[in-house]
Image (cartoon, grey):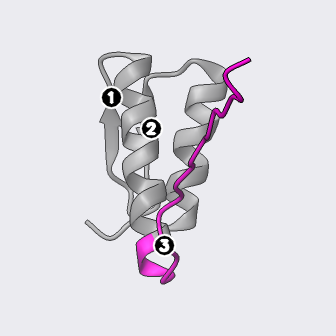
Amino acid sequence: MAYTQDDLISIREAIATGEKSVTFADGKAVTYRSLAELMQAEQIIRKYLEAAAGRRPRRAFRMNVSKGV
C-alpha cells in the first residue's frame, strides 16, 4: 500500500483523540487493537514517507563524557 501525507494525518488525529479506527485516503478503514499498535502504524507510515521523499532516517547519538574526577 502506498501511503500519503493524508494517511499520516489521519493516524495522528486518531492517536490524539484516542480513537482506534482510522479511514485512510483510499477509503479503507482499519480498526487497531490498541494505542500501541496505532503508534507503531504511525511510525511505519512516517518512515515510508521519509524514504519516498529521499530523506535519511533520523538518528541520534548521545555522548556522555567525564574527566573521571
38 left or right, relative to 61: left
How far is disc 3 from disc 1 in space, using C-alphas? Answer: 30 Å
Q: What residue sits 38% from the left and 56% below the top?
A: 27
Check the image and report above or below for 68 versus 42. above
Q: What residue sits 56% from the left and 46% below the top?
A: 10
Q: Which mark is residue 22?
A: 2
- Are dots 2 and 3 in contact, CB under 8 Å? no
- Are dots 1 and 2 in contact, CB under 8 Å? yes
Check the image and report above or below for 51 versus 17. below
Judging by the rendered image, the residue that carries numbered circle 1 is 31
Screen quadrant of the N terminus: bottom left
Judging by the rendered image, the residue that carries numbered circle 3 is 56
Q: Which numbered disc, 3 or 1, marks the residue that appears first in the sequence?
A: 1
Check the image and report above or below for 4 versus 55. above
How far is disc 2 from disc 3 in space, using C-alphas? Answer: 27 Å
Q: What residue sits 48% from the left and 83% below the top?
A: 54
User: Label 1 is placed on what type of residue?
Assistant: Thr
> What range of the chain is rendered magenta?
51-69
Q: Is residue 52 magenta?
A: yes
68 left or right, relative to 31: right
**The one of 46 and 9 positioned closer to us in this rendering:** 46
Which mark is in front, 2 or 3? Answer: 3
Percent position of residue 42, x then y: 46, 43
